[in-house]
């Protein structure tokens, strides 16, 4: 019986293991992970911190018993230290510092990503501030439990979040829900730089409306202790120095692929340090696959990219598992579809924004429009702000961004767009889709169809000018 070993017990690693056991219940599958939290939904961390989810254990997609019942063998708190690709051996060290060699026939690397620690004086180095000082990074369940311990033991009043990407925004909401006053500092000119600044500005308004102090164009330079508190010193693009004194600092400025194990084994990385894999999730070395946040992302419109997302990690893991058993399945590619809840609003995107489309040779036109989420005569209707990007030359739909109320079915509507882009539909063809309608939930022309029609009329009027 061949043995398949997987390093990493999160979305990609467990998806691979489940697929292998599903296809072959004789398979000998081992999952090695360096913590004790296999198959946890780290995407749910903000909702445990906020209190919406009362017990962190509820964040488990499956508990240990359910995982073991599938027949996989889990090696918890076990760090994979190096791979000998020629001898097919993985060297690991367990919690009690015992070394072991695990032989494999096929190995899947699913080591994910680690949070970026930005160059801020006071972070990194021998005198680095850390958890004991109230300074936290956030990626794993271990990080989360440490943060919640700080929140419970110190009863802080003020928090400062460095970074306003989607995790930073979710955490601004979570900490506000816990009763903290939150300041968010972002060095870029607008929050949520993964969407156009026009939509970022609407997200910013919502944060302000909910009492979050948002300082954009503000780069944190130094964090230091002042008694029991933390002083954060920053420089604003306009207006010079900014200082805030807070009780807890959360640094969430993105992730980088965790690839030291792969690199040391001679596996090729791309320029950004992610593991280079083909669409079958094969690395350059035989019998070695990789999946999830540690690998490059094949994007249907961009080619190779890096888009660390849970949705992608699940799919890639499943494919790596199937192919480690001898399969030939290919990853169909990502569109970077994502959706974020920010208090009472939701923002979502799929496909390309204007500058991204131009960079890969399209001739993009982006048109912003607004439509009600359902018929205005039925109570509670609200506007959705939509930005559609299409290719002037071919009329092809390239990207959609949406912003609206929590109850406006933004996620459903971005998924319509994602499906259309996945199948290379034109903007015009969106109007032909047979979408559902009843006045309390929609309109005869759904909002995304209205946005597509607005794009088409702008293109036509530009052509006739
Ligand atoms: C707060 C938060 C919210 C998020 N929200 C969303 C969301 O709403 N939607 C979305 O699509 N994505 C979201 N994401 C991203 C998503 O969670 C990740 O893309 C996904 O979890 C990646 O899975 P992975 O298995 O590739 O890697 P990871 O989850 O990073 O897991 C890596 C695994 O490898 C193990 N490991 C690493 N090195 C070693 C080693 N040397 N030896 C042994 N084990 C090792 C780790 O212990 C872990 O088990 C969120 C992430 C965070 C942090």
Image (cartoon, rainbow, N blue to C red):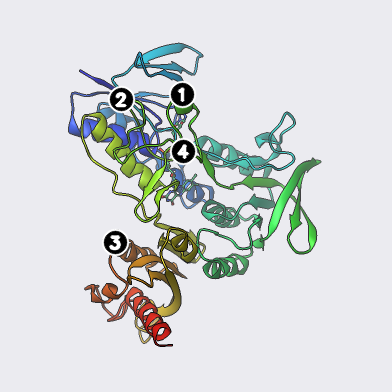
How many numbered circles are shown?
Answer: 4
Of labels 2 and 1, earlier in sequence is 1
- Identify the element where label 4 is drawn: loop
Which residue lies under the disc numbered 2? 287
Tell me the residue that label 4 is attached to.
270
Which of the two discs, 2 and 1, sits closer to the camera? 2
Whole-number angstrom distance, CA of label 2 to CA of label 4: 19 Å
Which disc number belongs to residue 419?
Answer: 3
Q: CA distance from mark 2 to mark 3?
A: 33 Å
Residue 93 or 219: which is nearer the viewer? Answer: 219
Q: Check contact, mark 2 vs mark 4: CB within 8 A.
A: no
Tell me if label 3 and label 4 are in contact, CB under 8 Å: no
Give 247 or 452, whichever is nearer the viewer: 452
Question: Marks 3/4: CA distance?
Answer: 29 Å
Q: Is residue 280 visible from the viewing direction of this image?
A: yes
**Measured from the top left, where is residue 123 in percent x and y?**
69, 38
- Whichever of callouts 2 and 3 sits on the residue coming sooner in the sequence is 2
Q: Is residue 403 left or right of residue 204?
A: left
Q: Position of residue 341 (x, y in %)?
A: 47, 60
Tag 1, which secondary structure?
loop
Query: Which quadrant: the N terminus?
Result: top left
Q: Which residue is labeled 1 in the image?
A: 77
Q: Nearer the viewer, mark 1 or mark 3?
A: 3
Mark 3 or mark 4, which has the lower sequence index? Answer: 4
In whole angstroms, how far apart are the C-alphas of marks 1 and 3?
A: 40 Å
Label 3 CA crowd tier, 10 Å (few <14, some 14–19, many 20+)? few
Name the quadrant where ligand 1 sits.
Answer: top left
Tell me which numbered mark, 1 or 3, is placed earlier along the sequence: 1
How many residues crowd around disc 1 within 10 Å: few (fewer than 14), some, or many (20 or more)? some
User: Would you place residue 109 above or below residue 375 in this image?
Assistant: above
């Amino acid at each position: 019986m061949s043995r398949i070993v997987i390093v990493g017990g999160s979305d990609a690693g467990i998806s691979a293991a489940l697929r292998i056991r599903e296809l072959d219940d004789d398979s000998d599958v081992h999952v090695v992970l360096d913590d004790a939290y296999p198959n946890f939904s780290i995407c749910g961390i903000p909702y445990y911190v906020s209190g919406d989810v009362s017990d962190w254990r509820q964040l488990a997609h499956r508990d240990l018993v359910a995982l073991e019942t599938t027949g996989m063998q889990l090696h918890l708190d076990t760090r994979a230290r190096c791979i000998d690709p020629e001898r097919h051996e993985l060297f690991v060290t367990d919690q009690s510092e015992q070394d072991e060699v695990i032989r494999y026939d096929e190995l899947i690397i699913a080591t994910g990503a680690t949070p970026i620690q930005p160059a801020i004086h006071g972070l990194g180095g021998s005198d680095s501030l850390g958890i004991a000082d109230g300074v936290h990074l956030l990626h794993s369940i271990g990080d989360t439990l440490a943060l919640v311990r700080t929140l419970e033991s110190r009863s802080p009043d003020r928090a400062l979040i460095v970074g306003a990407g989607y995790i930073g925004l979710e955490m601004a909401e979570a900490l506000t829900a816990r009763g903290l006053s939150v300041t968010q500092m972002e060095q870029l000119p607008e929050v949520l730089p993964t969407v156009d600044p026009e939509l970022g500005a609407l997200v910013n308004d919502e944060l302000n409306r909910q009492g979050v102090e948002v300082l954009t164009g503000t780069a944190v330079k130094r964090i230091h202790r002042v008694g029991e508190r933390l002083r954060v010193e920053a420089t604003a693009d306009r207006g010079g120095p900014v200082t805030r004194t807070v009780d807890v600092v959360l640094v969430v400025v993105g992730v980088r692929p965790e690839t030291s194990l792969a690199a040391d084994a001679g596996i090729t990385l791309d320029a950004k340090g992610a593991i280079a894999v083909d669409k079958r999730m094969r690395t350059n070395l035989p019998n070695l696959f990789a999946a999830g946040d540690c690998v490059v992302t094949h994007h249907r419109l961009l080619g190779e990219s890096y888009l660390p997302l849970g949705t992608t990690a699940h799919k890639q893991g499943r494919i790596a598992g199937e192919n480690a058993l001898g399969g030939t399945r290919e990853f169909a590619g990502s569109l970077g579809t994502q959706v974020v809840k920010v208090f009472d609003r939701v923002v979502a995107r799929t496909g390309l924004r204007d500058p991204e489309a131009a960079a890969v040779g399209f001739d993009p036109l982006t048109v912003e429009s607004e439509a009600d989420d359902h018929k205005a005569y039925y109570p509670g209707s609200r506007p959705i702000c939509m930005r559609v990007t299409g290719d002037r030359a071919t009329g092809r739909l390239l990207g959609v961004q949406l912003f609206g109320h929590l109850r406006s079915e933004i996620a459903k509507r971005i998924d319509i767009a994602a499906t259309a882009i996945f199948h290379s539909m034109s903007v015009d063809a969106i109007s032909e889709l047979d979408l559902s309608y009843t006045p309390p939930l929609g309109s005869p022309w759904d909002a995304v169809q209205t946005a597509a029609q607005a794009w088409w009329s702008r293109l036509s009027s530009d052509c006739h000018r």
